[in-house]
Structure formats: C-alpha cells, structure tokens
Image (cartoon, rainbow, N blue to C red):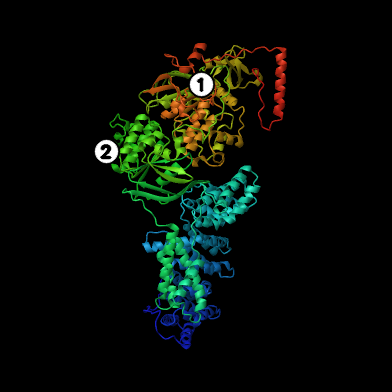
Amino acid sequence: MPHPESPPMQPIMVSSKSAAPSPDDIAALNKTIYTSKTSQESLDASYALTDVLLNSVGARGLAAYGVLEEVLKAAGDKKTAPRREGAMFALGAIFERFPPKARLSEVVFLLQEQALLPCALDALADRGSAVKEGARYAIDALYGHLSSEGRVYGLLPVLLTYLRKKTGKWQGTVGAFELIGRMADDAKMGMESKEVEENKDVLREALGRHLATMIPIVEAGMHDLKSEVSKQAIKSMNSMTALLQNDDVAPRIPLLIKSMEDPSAEAQRAAIHALSQTTFVTVVTSPVLALLTPLLERSLNTPTTPQEVLRQTVVVTENLTKLVHDPIEARAFLPKLKPGVQSVRDRASLPEVREIGQRALDVINKALGEVKSGAEGRSSQPIERTQPDEVAALLEKEIKQNGGLLNYPGDSELWIHAKKFISECVAEDANQRVLNRVVRNVEPYLQPLMDDGKATTVAQAVLSFYTAEDTRKYGVPEKEDDGEVEIVNANFSLGYGGMLLLSHTNLRLLKGHRYGLCGRNGAGKSTLMRSIATGKLDGFPPQDEVKTCFVEHNQGEDAEITILEYCLKDPDIKSEGKERISAVLEEVGFSSGPEGRQQQKVGSLSGGWKMKLALARAMLMRADVFLLDEPTNHLDVANVKWLQDYLKTHTDISSLIVSHDSAFLDEVCTDVYNYENKKLVHYKGNLADLVKVRPEAKSYYTLSASQVQFKFPPPGILTGVKSNTRAILRMTNCTYTYPGATKPNLFEVSGALTLSSRVAIIGPNGAGKSTLIKVLTGETVPQQGKVEKHPNLRIGYIKQHALEHVEMHMEKTPNQYLQWRYANGDDREVLMKQTRVLTEEDKAQMAKFIQLPDGNGARQIEALIGRQKYKKSFQYEVKWVNWLPKHNTMISRETLLEYGFQKLIQEFDDHEASREGLGFRTLEPKVISKHFEDIGLDPEIANHNEISGLSGGQKVKVVLAGAMWNNPHLLVLDEPTNFLDRDSLGGLAVAIRDYKGGVVMISHNEEFVGALCPEQWHVDAGRLTQKGHLAVSLDRFEDSRPGSSAVSSAAPSTAVSSAAPSTNGTPIGSGAQSEAEDGGDMKFRARKKKKLTRAQQKEREVRRRLRHIEWLNSPKGTPHPPDTDDEA
C-alpha cells in the first residue's frame, strides 16, 4: 500500500555508472533520519537514502555503509522515541523501494540480516503511535513485494523462528500470526487473472509442504495465556486449513480445530469418529497429513484411549496412507504414526484391533518403501523430487562456465544466502511443474553478482535443464485422437471411511458412448456415481459444462401428489413446461388425460414405474451424461427392451451404467470400465468382449459362489410336519383392494407353499405381485378370503424396496440393528405388521368377559402364558385379570378363536415360533458377527460401519441377515437380485439351492429364476395362474455337471427336484397332496411314540451319558445336545 507521505519514485538504474556515495553522505542522511524535529523531514531523508543507494551500489550498500546496523540500533533505543520512529521510517522506505528494483535485497532482509523483521514486529508493541504505524507500514511493504516463493522460503522461516522465541512482545506475536494467516488467505482459490491464480497455486502448494512445521507452532499459540494471542492463533489456524483443498476433510475442520483448541479426550474421540465416517473422494496430500497426523499420533500414543477409538484411528491411518498420491509425502509423516500403530498391533486388548493394526502396519511399511512389490507384483517407484542441493550444484556449474561472480567485498557471504534462497525457489517450481517461473527466480538475483548478460544465460541454462528433466520424469503426454468428442477426462481417487475404493485412476468419457461399470459389491460403483452427481469428484467438469443426471427411483417423499404434479414441482425440469413434460411422460408409458397414469399418485407406483418416472426426469433435464444405477431393477422384460432401444438410439447422450444384468450390459454397452486393483481399467466393447480379455469376468454369466459364499441356517423342525410336501402356508380366495383404489389389486387368489417349494411369482409391472406377497406374509389383511399358516411357522421376508427394513436405523451398525430387532426374544418387525397391530375392535374384544362351563363365572383374559399339544391342535394356558396364577385355565385353540381372540393367539404363536428359532442363538456381538459373515458381509463392516454409509448391496445383505437370524422355515424374497453384484448374486443362488426350507420369490431376472424355481405363479391384472413345474436350468451353476438335469451333489435331499408336482385344478399347487391327507385343515397329527424294550432303553441311556460327557469336555458355550425319543 502506498505511504501517504512518501515522495514520488524516480526512475532508477540499478546497474548505473553513478559514483558510489561517500560514507559522509550516508552518515548525513542517517543523522537527518534519526534526529529530525519533524516526522516529514525524517521520512524524506529515508527515501533520499534509498534513492542514493539504488542509483549507485544497490543492495550491497545496505550492509557496506552500515545502514541496516544503524536501523537496528535506533529501533532498540528505549529512551529516544524520535530515533525509534526514524528507524521505522527508514525500514519502511527500504522495504518499499528496494525489492521491486533490486530483488537481491530480499536475501539481505530475510536471510542475511534476520533481525530486521523481528525488529519491526517488536515495534508493534511501542508506546508511540507513530512508531507502531511505521512498523506496520514497513511489514506490509515487505510482504506486498515478495513473490510466492519468497514468502515461503524467505519470510516464513523468519516468522516461525520469531514465534518459537518466547521472549518476544505479545503484540509482535499477534503480528506474526497475522502474517501467517494472511499468507494462507492469499493462497485461497479465486476468480482473478491467470497470473494471479498461478501465484496463489504456487503459494498454496509450497505452504502446504510446510504445514507440518507450522501447525505445532500455531497450535501452541492457541493455548497462549494472552487472549489476544490465542484468538489470533485460532483465526490463523482456520485460514491455514484452507490450504487443504480437500472437500472430504473440510466439513470436519471445525471438529479438528476444536480438538486442538481443547485437547480433551472427548474432543479427540469426536474428531476421530467423524474422520472414520468420512467418505474420502479426493487425493490426500501433505497438507491433509500435516493437519491429521498430530491428532492421530496423540490418539495412538495416549494410554487411556478406548479400544474402539484406537480401532477407528488405525483404520483412518491405513486409509490415509493408501490415498496419498506421492509416497514421498507420506514418508514425512508416517514415521511419527508407525510406532503407535506397532504398539496397537502388539498390545491392544481386543484381537480384532490387533489384526487391524497389523493390516495398517503392512500398508505403512509399503508406503515407506519397506515392501517393494505392488498389487500385481510390480515395483511402484515414486517420481523423485528435485532437491535444493541439486539446484545449487547446477547453479555453481553454470556460473563457473559463464565467468563466475564479480566478487566485490561481501559478495561471498551474500552469495551463500542467495544460493540457498534461489535453489529452494527453483526446486519448488520444478516440483510443481511451473517452469515458466524459473527464470524470474534466478536472473534478478544473479544480475548484481555477475557481468551484464551473464545472469540471463545462467537462468536460461537452468530452465533448459529442468525442462528436459520434466520430460524425462513425466514423458510427453499422449492424447488419443480418435475423431470423437471428449467430454470428460478426470484423474481422481475414491474412498469411504476406512476403505479405499479407487486409487489415482482415470475416467474418460466420449460423447454418445455407453460405459458399463463392473465390479464387486462394495467396490464403489454407486459411490462413484453419487460423487459425480453431487459434484464432489476431483477433476470432473462442473454441471454448467457437462450436465449429469443420476437416475434413481427416490420419489417416496412426494407419495401423495400426482405424477404430473411431481414433475412440475421438480426445480430441475419445471422450466420445460407442462406440455413437454406431459409429452415425455407419455413417451415412456404414462398416458395423459383425466383417467391416465399421469394423474395417479406417485405412492401408488410399483418399482418398475418409479424407475420409468426417473428415466423421464433424466430425459427432461437434457443431460449430457446419464448416470444409471441398476436401471433394470423392477423393470419387466418389455420395459427393459424399451430402455435398451432408447439408449442405443440417442447417440447424443453418454451413459455410465451400473447393472448386474449381464444381458442388458451386453446389449447396450460400447465400452466397459472394470474395477481392477483399485483402478478403473477401460475395455472397448461390451461385457462379452471383456470376458475374452479377462476370463475371470465369466462370473458375470454364471451363478457361482466362488467369490462370495452365503450360508443359510437350517430351518428347524415344524411340529407335526413329516413331509416336505405338506402345506405349511395357504391362502384361499383372497381379494385385496388398496385404500382409495377403484378396483381390487388381487382377485380371488389361492395358493399354498411347502418346505420344498421353489416358487417364482412373475408378471408385468403393476400386476399385483408384491401385493400377493404382502397378503401371503401377513403384511396386509385381505378384505375377503383367509390366510392360514402353521402355528410355529417362521417366515423370513425381504421387501421389494429392501432398504425399508433398515431405513429407520441408519445411525446403527448392522450388528446393533440385529441386536435391536431381536432384543426381547421376538422379531420386532413381525410385531409391526398390520395383522399384528391391535385395532379398536381388538381392544374392545380384550375387555369382554367370557363365561366358561367351569363354575367360576365371567372373567377377563389378561394374557396367554403357555401352550401345549392337545389332540390335533393346541390348548393355551390363560391368566385371568385379578385372579391368582393357581386359577389359570387351559383353553383349546378352537374355543379361543370362537370367542374372537385370534390376534392374541397369533401374538403368542409368533412368540413361540421365534423362541424355537432362537433356541440355539446367542444374541451377542461375536455370534452376530459370524452370522453376517455367513451372509457375505465383512465382519469389519458389520461391527463398525453405520448402515447409512453402506452401499445398496451391503444394506440388502444386512436385511437378509436379519430375516435369517431366527432360522425361518420359509424365505420370501421380493426382487432379491436388486442391488446385488454378480458374485453376491451367485452366492445367493447357491445358498437358495442348498437351503432346506421353502422359497418364494419375485424376480424379473430370468437367469436367476430359471436356475432355481421349477414352479411359477403368473400374476396378471390381479389374478393368479399357476404354470406347474418346469425343468430348472442347473447348467447355469458353475458347480453343476454339463448337461445335468438333476441337482448337484452339493444340494441336500430336500432340494427343488423333490417337490411334488402341482395338481391341475388344485389352487394350492405343491400342497395338494397334504390337503388330500388332512382334508384341507391346517392341523397336524402328533407322531405316535414307539415303546422301547428294556435293552433298547439301556442302550439309549448309554448313548445319552456318552453325549453328556462329550459336551462337558467341549469348549465353553457349546449348546447341550438334545435328548430326543427318535435319536439313532
């Protein structure tokens, strides 16, 4: 900023032939500066002194004539205020005039005479306002003339040295912190000229490399007892965090700064937890490591850190290490973390934490170069950095070849400092690959020290050398020129919490191409798509350049408005106008008019129609790139064909597609991106072409459990059911109409299921398939007809929108969700069904008095507390209101039903069924973790990651594990293939094939259904037609024999092929035989016991005793083997 009273600056010749001033001339000017009676005289003399020196000897004169020595003496004169004032005027004039014309003076001010800037900072505490004002002006003048490199390698070291010194004035400390904060603020990105933004970029990168040194000093200032110092230090720390340029860590910065300001255990835990729940998308650079390393180091080395916090710390450390682009940056920080991670591995109390510690230590060792091999056995050598010593050697060589230095008195000492300064600046430019700045950081500093023109020659030689080095290191970039329009070319890394998903990979999209995105579940496909859609992906063009649309069916929050109103309400498409919106909706199948589909409520749409509505929205947005995440989910065959045709005919739209439908990918894809070793690898062609190059991708075509194995628990025994073909669930003439609908969704539907059932329910979108399932499982109550089931039947049910099961528990981990669901011995989700909720009529029924023929008068039922077999049914122990337990009564099931206590019986039967299923289940984290592992979910994720952070496929596994926990007899799956990748789909198919209970499913995946379900129920317009038994395609399993029509040897004896064929004209299909046996009543005969001889009884006692002894010697927690009458 210009000094209000400084005289205009005259043209100055740095290399002039003016005679050097005499010492007397300089002494006279110095006397005027320090003894003038007015401030103006002192100021004029200061500028006169600078002009004389600049026009003659230049920067050399500052030391040669003792000008700077005199300034320091006057500034330290505590008794004479005018001398201190004159010193600040002289310093201000020197700092203002010298740097623009004599760049070598920066070396003098900051490296040779390091006391100058501290002198000005101390003057900020002076009692005289003129002195303080002069000091402030001098500091601002120097700061304003320094280059980005000069601020980092000249100014910053002086400031940090001053702050380390505890004897400085607190006002000076505040001033130093202000300068550091100002440097950080000046490094923030903006919208200024290219040159200004380049300066900011260089300053930001260079400062980032020094954060590790800066942060501890500024953090110490945050705890200073002087409030002004601590406030400024906190403000500067907030400014420094802008250097991170990391959108993932940015939301956590307030917590991180709070943990520095208040280093309590609670603040530390909060910060670590926040980091462990962070989705990492951007590359982790040294500024991020500099900010996080002190926190992680403190957490690892504090003896009282809880095990869970230690686990999170180690996971975050591992993830950060993997995401560092340059291992050299990691080597500056990881040695501080490695001892703590080693300590966790060796001494953590939990085996799981020790195991994670070992894993993190392996990653750290690899980053430090102790493990050379990469993921594919190749050595991964980082590109070496240019070191200042190398630049210094090159400078010496080039200077020598160009005549050497002039060697005036004092030049040798000045050159020592100048060489160090120039070398650091040039090394920074070379490492940042901004070689256009090399000459300006060499030539001006060498000009006063060499003959005319030689400095330019040396600077050009240095530039040529590092241009060649840059080409050697990075090569000449090759750009593929295939004549097509490139719309995206992004380099990025992607991670979530403790999981690295993609590391330093490239995504290139061409206009009109359709890219399939292939990878296992949890590889990061949906995370990548969502990062693109939300603008968080590093290097991806913003929406105003390349418009993207994420196609997903998420219309649940607007369920009560019509489809047309929903589109008109959408801010992204309402500008298209009602006519165009209606036309596009009609194009995808939503008919217009008062009675058309456009007037239907959004909440009434099936999954398939919701997906079509999402596609219509994408069309209306006129997007350049469609992000299609499982677009065929819920779509029937006709609608899948329509989508294929739409994508192939619109060649102006690029698509990025995640789908587990291999036939769909084969049909539409022009290119494939495959996840390989945390990289996106590009292949031209469709999925079939990928398999030719990568044979392991064949898993996309076969149902195999080679990668992911699901293991379903056995269903257990159903009392009275001796045959796998006996009906256990039956619906008869059921009609159901949704509230407000004009016609039934189901009309007189009948059917039955057995333990050997493998039934596929198929039909077009909106035909009533999911409604049929809901009626069958008790989710809804039919207005006509009845649904009967075995009293002890346990059903595992996965809804069409599977995530509904867990959407109220997003803050829980999967392990905690399962503990909540079964905490009371019952399945809480069963109790939430519509058929289990007590209506007002049910409550009135419970209050009624009933009279039994036992002479005790009318009484109220309080509860059912027991049940036992009674003939072909059950009788229940009834506790009466206000009666002691000794007056409890056994009442038959039929009598209670006659009095209207159906829901009371149902509630008790559910409890008994759940109790039987959970008889050998211990609801503790270790057992639950093993159960999740059986279902294919990593125990690390199941135990520690919140459900909100899981991928769609991982959430489906959580729901599946919840449904299978109580060992169900019947598994009901509504669109089970949605969200699961090919490996998980194969694992699920093999588990269903080998499962000993019944299975009924809805799926549009013909491959999945054809391999598993010999019986099909066709639903169309609310009516059910059974197609009988078909041959299953066992060759679709990778472990089946070619040409085999029987179940693989791995399948149990109760496999699909053992199911009895449907009987024509019989509404219950596979239950026909059982209905003929028992006359259609859902009652079950108890087996007649065979009386044993005395010898047989003795043999049985011996076997039981031996089993008991074996159990006593087994590990603690092993369940006691049951003693049954039918044992071998």
Label for residue 597? none
Against 496, is 762 above or below?
above
According to the picture, the residue beneath numbered tag 1 turns out to be 756
Residue 1114 position, x and y percent, is 69, 31
Residue 1101 position, x and y percent, is 72, 19
Q: Is residue 489 left or right of residue 249?
A: left
Residue 556 position, x and y percent, is 41, 36
Against 641, is 542 above or below?
below
Residue 331 position, x and y percent, is 55, 57
According to the picture, the residue beneath numbered tag 2 turns out to be 579
Residue type of the residue flagged with mark 2: Glu
For residue 657, what is the image quadrant? top left
| Mark 1 / mark 2, whichever is N-terminal | 2
Q: Can residue 329 be seen in this view?
A: yes
Tag 2, which secondary structure?
Answer: helix
Q: Which residue lies furthest to the left in this view?
A: 579
Against 675, is 912 above or below?
above
Task: Estimate how packed mark 2 is, as few (under 14), some (14 to 19) or many (20 or more) residues with alpha carbons within 10 Å.
Answer: few
Please name which of the two marks, 1 or 2, marks the residue nearer to the observer: 1
The image quadrant where one finds the N terminus is: bottom left
The image quadrant where one finds the C terminus is: top right
Tag 1, which secondary structure?
Answer: loop
Label 1, label 2: how far apart the Cα atoms are: 53 Å
